[in-house]
Image: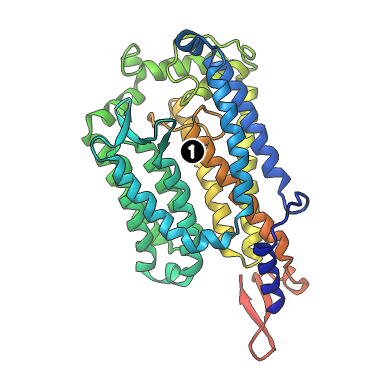
Amino acid sequence: MSSQATRKTSVIDKPSFDFGLDLDRMILFLYITLVLLGLVMVASASIGIADQQIQDPFYYAKRQFIRILMSLVLIWIAWRIPLEFWNKNGMALMLGSIVLLGVVLIPGVGHTVNGSTRWLNFGLFTFQISEVSKLFLIIYLSGYLTRRAAEVQTNTMGFLKPMFIMAFASGLLILEPDFGAATVLLLTGFGMMFLGGVRFGQFIVFILGALAIMVILAISSPYRMARITSFLDPWADPFNSGFQLTQSLIAIGSGGWFGSGLGGSIQKLFYLPEAHTDFLFAIYAEEFGLVGTVILISLYAVFALRCFSIGKMTLLGQQAFGAYLAYGVGLLITLQAIINIGVNMGALPTKGLTLPFISYGGNSILTMSFAVGLVLRVYKEFKQAGSPKPKSARGNSSKQVIGKGKSGKNKRVPV
């Protein structure tokens, strides 16, 4: 016990600058690949609109590059902060984000763009609370599932307590309106609760209830109903409500097997709105074709698998908070990528979500990059703990490890 305490103290009091074994190279390689690919695509997709509006063809690319540099700093900061800090302050962070979600809705305070009030305007920059709230939910749930594991798995209230917080935050997001962020937040939370061992019956009932409420909210709003209608049949009104989706489908279909080549997109030339933000995937598919699309999706899939792999080995190392944090980040990034790609392909209604690490957008890339830094910190603390599974447990199919009881005798502890 004393040796473990010494190791934990050394992690906090003596931060290491060694980027060797303490850094997961796979996660870092995937992240750098995706952000650099995103930078190239932002430059390609925005060159026409930037030249017309600002007389600087690479205006958006330059801003994206600056944000990538800022993101690298945030990754380093997240990599340096001990997980214990996030474990202790998760609830406060989540409640703080909920308060800010409420502040955004105050008339005259929130910044409105395209009919949605999602930002706080600080002059030099705007701050989108929904991006941060998704990350803070992961941190909060990671701590909750660590502290209340038995209650979540056996008691209904243990499951419902975080659900109330998720429902309240989602309600505020829908009022902005930001239906996409609310969907990602709920799905990520549901996924983490499922991994936390919640009873399957409760899980299914709550999901069905949440889906029913979201359907009612969708059909009760003319704004959201119009989006759903255009999604179901965009060709019914291709020059009005279905314009964005039809142009996206034309771009994807024009890509063929290998695409038109980098910079060869036609749809980005004032045909497809939001070509460098929400619909950047369509331009990517047009320029790199089916082969390039499969490669991009594979990068996200490998990223998700690596996050889950880190989560699994961390959980086996009895570091539950870090494990759920890695699971949550993997779920968040994967779900948002799936939804964005689904929207671009006409498989889902328009949500206004960016493609992680790829789309233009400061709040998104900064927040997602910080989340990557948290996963790197999880890996760092797991490696520094130096607690591999005992040999006697490696071949044990019941997934138990051998520990010492108070009496000094061997005692089985479930993983």
Q: Quadrant of the C terminus?
A: bottom right
| Image quadrant assignment for residue 294 | top right
Asked if residue 401 can be seen in this view, the reply is yes
- Disc 1 crowd rating (10 Å Cα; few below 14, some 14-19, many 20+) is many
**Rendered residue at 72%/75% (across/down):** 3
Q: Position of residue 361 (x, y in %)?
A: 49, 30
Residue farthest toward the front in the current orientation of the protein: 123
Where is residue 71 drawn, in percent x and y? 58, 38
| Label 1: which secondary element | helix
Give the answer, above or below, for where 266 lies relative to 307: above
Q: Which residue is mark 1?
A: 336
Question: Can you give x and y, in whole percent of width and height, for residue 74 in the image?
Answer: 58, 43
Q: Is residue 391 left or right of residue 198?
A: right
93 left or right, relative to 301:
left
- Nearer to me, 87 or 323: 87
Quarter location, residue 59: top right
Where is residue 162? Give x, y as percent.
Answer: 38, 60
**Among all residues in the image, which is located at the extreme bottom?**
407
Q: Nearer the viewer, residue 407 or 252?
A: 407
Residue 405 against residue 22 in the figure, above or below:
below
